[in-house]
Each structure stands twice: as C-alpha cells, then as structure tokens.
Amino acid sequence: MNKYHMQIRVIDGPAGAAARVKLLRSVLMKSLEAALWETTLAAHKAGLDDVVREVAFEWMDTMKFSFFANRLICTGAIHARRRVEEVDEVVAMVRKLGMEPMVAEAARRRLAGIAALGLKDYFNAEEPKDYRKVLEAVDTLVARRAERAKEQ
C-alpha cells in the first residue's frame, strides 16, 4: 500500500481490534485537525495566523510526537486545573473574535474532568515520568469513586 502512502500493520487481538485501533486513532487525528482549524481561523481573525503557526509549530517541531504526548499526559495530571483556567481565557477570546470555540470548550470539559480526579494530590504534585503511571492512577481513582458511590 506504499503507493497510497499508507502503513499496513497487523493488529493482534480479537476480531474487530484493528477497527477499534483505527477509530481510537481517529480521536487524536480528527481532534488535532479540528484544533488546527479552530486555532488557524481564530489566529487569522486576529491577524496573527503566521506568527501563531510559527510559535506553535516551532516548539512542536523540536521533539518527537511520542515524547510530546507523554509530556502532555504527565504534566496534565498535575496542571489540569490551571489549564482549565487558561482555556477559559481562550474561550472568551475566541468568542470576542466572533467564533464559536467548539474545540476549546471540548478541551475545557476534558481537562476539567481530569482535574476533578485529583491526580495532583495522588502524585503529591510531582509530575510522573510515564503516561502509563497516569493511566494506572486514573483507573485507581475511578475505582475508588465507584466504591464510595456503592457505599452511599
């Protein structure tokens, strides 16, 4: 499939695993595309499209995406609440530009949910080094909540 610029990978697992991988990958790819659209359109309306792209892409181009993704999950475990506050400012600015901040509002909801888990306390405000530790913590905290809900 190289002539179509596609990578083919065999996915181990039960029937449907490859389709699930494709759809879950699409969460990232389509959300990233939507975020790029919202950022680019808002920056254009503000007369800042070239400089916003330059500043954002310059930083992102300095590292592998896998490192960047791990970093966002690990730092987000500690800083999600502050990021919600920053996104509140983004939402207000995008609205002032005459746009509906669809992606920013979705980001706010997701980050608020992460903040509400209490990961900062769980990790004693120290950033974990591996996203897998964050996922384990999420599983633990969600299970604790479920147990408390059963007891009530």
Image: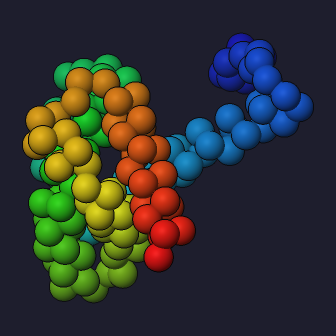
Q: How is the image coloured?
A: rainbow
- Residue 88 vs residue 109: left or right? left
Name the residue at 49% across, 59% down: 147
Q: Position of residue 94 (x, y in %)?
A: 24, 76
Quadrant housing the N terminus = top right
- Residue 102 vs residue 67: left or right? right
- Residue 45 vs residue 133: left or right? left
Q: Position of residue 101 (x, y in %)?
A: 34, 75
Give the residue furthest to the front.
151
- Residue 44 vs residue 46: left or right? right
Name the residue at 42% across, 35% down: 136
Task: Residue 78: tell me if it is visible.
Answer: yes
Q: Position of residue 131 (x, y in %)?
A: 35, 30
Task: Residue 57: tell me if it is visible.
Answer: no
Compare residues 42 and 149 and report the one nearer the observer. 149
Image mark count: 0
Compare residues 31 and 83 and report the one nearer the observer. 83
Compare residues 131 and 122 and report the one nearer the observer. 122
Give the residue furthest to the right.
15
Name the residue at 77% across, 18% down: 12
Name the residue at 78% across, 38% down: 19
User: In the picture shown, does residue 5 fall above or below 26?
Assistant: above
User: In the picture shown, does residue 152 fall above or below 57?
Assistant: below
User: In the picture shown, does residue 102 fall above or below 119?
Assistant: below
